[in-house]
Every structure is written in structure tokens, then in C-alpha cells.
């Protein structure tokens, strides 16, 4: 069931992989930088896939959650670098649910992206935790109890204001027709902010809704 949820996430185009045709199978550890993808959980929870994900879309008040930490080339990205992937210990999965609140998503991210990092599973998920800790979420988005109406530029500016060293070239916004879906931040292999390259996700909406977080 949860693996089905992860597939549903992919069908919605929430990964950088679906944002560009430049993916290719790569060699583990051979890449240039990372993208930390932070999904606005309340937007996901308003989709059919979210309705089928009680772990993420129950009563817990998730705001930004980690979608993934994706190895990137300067142009394009590797994917599924070990087939079949090394087995993922369920204790690692359980330990990541505070940041990535769906087991199917965690398994998918390891299979598709973690195997390209060149790291053992535990080290890769430790790195995800470090990458998330390196990014400060603007206070405006810490857990709104009413819908927010924002512009993509406003979201970028607020993240820049909250994170010393982050520039507009190092952050990308992903949206559907009405809602903010993700903020993607480009990081060096040492988790410092850097510019993004390649083809960014396209968000043409002048105004976006950020649905409120769910019950406390």
C-alpha cells in the first residue's frame, strides 16, 4: 500500500526526475551536488495520493517535510544506480518518519536516489537529517493555521532571509496550478548552499495557496 503511495507521488510529478528528461542511470557516488526537496505537506494532503496516505495526512501537523535528497549532475541527474538496490533496514525507515512521514516514500527515495549517493543507507539518511538541519524554515511557514496566499518570489525571498548564504540562484519553486508543492534547495556535497543548474521546475502561477497545517 505505502509503496503504491510513493508511486502516486511520482505520478504527480513531485520529483525533480519528472521535471526534466535528463535522468540517466549512473555510477554510485558519481555526481556533482545535491538537491534537498522540501514538500509542503498540506498541499500534498489535498491530492488523491495524500488522501491515501494516513501516515502523512492524518492529524499530525506536518508543514514542510523532506521529499528527498537527490544527487545531481551539472546537467541532468543519476537515478537507480544499483539494481536491485541494497535492502533498506526497517529501523532506518522508522527513524526517518519525523522528517519523511511515509514509509513508501522512504523506500522509494533510497531505491531511486540514495543508491546514487555512494553511501551506505544509514549514512545517506543521516546526511538527509544533516541537510534538513542546515536549512532554516522561515517563521511564516512554521505551521500556519489558516491558508496563506504567496507569490513564488515571496517564498524565495523569505527562505533567503532566513538562510545566510542562500541566493535566488540556489532555490527553486515547484507548484501545481494553484498550490505551492515544493521548495528545492541546491547544496554542495558538503551541504553548503550553491547555485542550481540544469532545467528548473516551471511554476507559472503568479499567486499560490499554501493550505494550513492540520490539527495539533
Image (cartoon, rainbow, N blue to C red):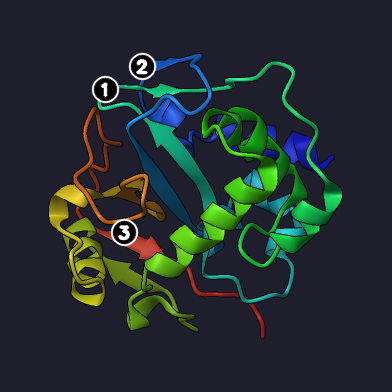
Q: Residue at x 23, y 57 (%)?
A: 152
Which residue position is annotated with label 2?
22
In the picture, the quarter occupied by the C terminus is: bottom right
| Element on which disc 3 rests | strand
Q: Residues within 10 Å of mark 3 (few under 14, many from 20)?
A: many
Check contact, mark 1 vs mark 3: CB within 8 A: no
Single out the mark in the foreground, 1 or 3: 1
13, 135: nearer the viewer: 135
Report x, y in % for residue 5.
72, 40
53, 96: nearer the viewer: 96
Check contact, mark 2 vs mark 1: CB within 8 A: yes
Report x, y in % for residue 128.
53, 54
| Element on which disc 2 rests | loop
Does residue 176 appear anywhere in the picture?
no
Q: Residue at x 59, y 21 (%)?
A: 80
Which residue position is annotated with label 3?
208
- In the image, is 59 to the left or to the right of 43? right
Alpha-carbon distance for marks 2 and 1?
7 Å
Which residue position is annotated with label 1?
75
| Above or below 150: residue 68 | above
- In the image, is 117 to the left or to the right of 99? left
Q: Residue at x 43, y 34 (%)?
A: 71
Name the image quarter holding residue 109: top right
Mark 3 or mark 2: whose residue is earlier in sequence = 2
Amino acid at each position: 500500500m505505502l509503496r503504491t503511495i510513493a508511486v502516486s507521488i511520482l505520478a504527480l510529478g513531485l520529483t525533480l526526475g519528472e521535471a526534466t528528461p535528463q535522468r540517466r542511470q549512473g555510477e554510485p557516488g558519481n555526481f556533482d551536488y545535491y538537491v534537498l526537496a522540501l514538500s509542503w505537506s498540506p498541499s500534498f494532503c489535498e491530492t488523491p495520493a495524500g488522501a491515501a496516505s494516513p501516515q502523512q495526512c492524518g492529524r499530525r501537523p506536518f508543514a514542510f517535510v523532506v521529499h528527498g535528497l537527490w544527487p545531481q549532475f551539472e546537467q541532468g541527474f543519476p537515478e537507480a544506480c544499483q539494481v536491485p538496490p541494497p535492502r533498506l533496514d526497517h529501523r532506518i525507515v522508522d527513524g526517518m518518519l519525523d522528517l519523511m512521514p511515509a514509509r513508501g516514500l522512504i523506500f522509494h527515495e533510497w531505491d531511486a536516489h540514495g543508491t546514487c549517493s555512494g553511501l551506505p543507507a544509514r549514512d545517506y539518511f543521516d546526511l538527509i537529517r544533516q541537510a534538513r538541519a542546515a536549512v532554516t524554515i522561515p517563521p511564516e511557514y512554521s505551521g500556519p493555521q489558516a491558508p496563506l496566499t504567496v507569490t513564488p518570489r515571496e517564498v524565495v525571498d523569505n527562505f533567503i532571509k532566513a538562510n545566510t548564504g542562500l541566493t535566488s540562484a540556489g532555490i527553486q519553486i515547484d507548484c501545481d496550478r494553484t498550490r505551492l508543492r515544493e521548495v528545492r534547495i541546491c547544496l554542495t556535497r558538503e551541504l553548503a548552499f550553491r547555485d542550481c543548474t540544469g532545467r528548473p521546475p516551471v511554476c507559472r502561477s503568479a499567486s499560490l495557496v499554501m493550505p494550513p497545517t492540520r490539527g495539533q
